[in-house]
Every structure is written in C-alpha cells, then in structure tokens.
Image (cartoon, helix red, strand yellow):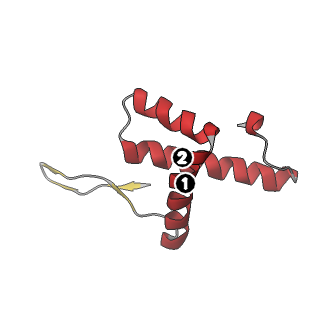
Amino acid sequence: APVNKESGSYEGQRNIRGGRHKIRTVMYMAMMSAMQCNPVFKTTYQRLLEAGKPKKTAIIACVRKMIVILNSMVRDGAMWDPKMS
C-alpha cells in the first residue's frame, strides 16, 4: 500500500514500500518486457495511459493484473491463454 509522507500542512508524495523488494523488482522488470511483447498487457497499459493514469501507476496496475492471472493459472493448473485475461 502507498505510504503517506505528511506532517501538518505538508503533503509529500506517496511511495509503495510494501512487499518483498526483490519480488517487486522482478515483477516490474517482467512487466516492462511484457508490455512490449504481449498484446494483452500492451493494450491494458495503453488504455490506462489514455485514461490519464501516470506511467508508473499504469505499470503497477499491469503488474497486479499479471499476478492475478498467474495465481489463477496456478490454482487451475492452466496454461497461458490470452482470452482469459
């Protein structure tokens, strides 16, 4: 979850610090590659940018989408199918 940096009337930016750092780094880099090669994530990323989301927010939303898809694949014992996303 984003961590607030606020005190009194000062409002800083929010940073995501939760979770395991190495896993977050690997998932982020995997998404950078997937956005270039995979049409499912590429269209999701473009749709979020067109909706006015900042680039990093759109990337993290795509990472979450990838995690949800991977979890469902493990749960169901399924292979990758672009139609399921």
Q: CA distance from mark 1 to mark 2?
A: 5 Å
Give the amino acid type for the residue marked by disc 1 in the picture. Ser
Question: Which of the two residues, 85 or 30, is positioned nearer the viewer here?
Answer: 30
Residue 54 image offset from top left, x and y in percent = 35, 40
Query: Which label is found at residue 36?
Result: 2
Image quadrant in which the C terminus is located: top right
Question: Which of the two residues, 32 or 53, is positioned nearer the viewer here?
Answer: 32
Residue 39 image offset from top left, x and y in percent = 62, 38
Does 29 appear above or below 42?
below
Image quadrant in which the N terminus is located: bottom left
Residue 79 image offset from top left, x and y in percent = 83, 50
Does 18 appear above or below 2?
below
| Secondary-structure class at tag 2 | helix
Question: Which of the two residues, 81 or 14, is positioned nearer the viewer here?
Answer: 81
Dot 2: few (<14), some (14–19), or many (≥20) neighbours within 10 Å? few
Query: Which label is found at residue 33?
Result: 1
Give the amino acid type for the residue marked by disc 2 in the picture. Gln
Q: Are marks 1 and 2 in contact (CB under 8 Å)?
A: yes
Dot 1: few (<14), some (14–19), or many (≥20) neighbours within 10 Å? few
Residue 31 image offset from top left, x and y in percent = 54, 53
Residue sitting at x 55%, y 51%: 63
Q: How many marks?
A: 2
Query: Which label is found at residue 52?
Result: none
| Secondary-structure class at tag 1 | helix
Residue sitting at x 36%, y 30%: 52
Residue sitting at x 41%, y 33%: 49
Residue sitting at x 50%, y 53%: 32
Farthest residue to the left: give it.
9
Is 74 on the left-hand or right-hand side of 50? right
Q: Which image quadrant for residue 74? A: bottom right
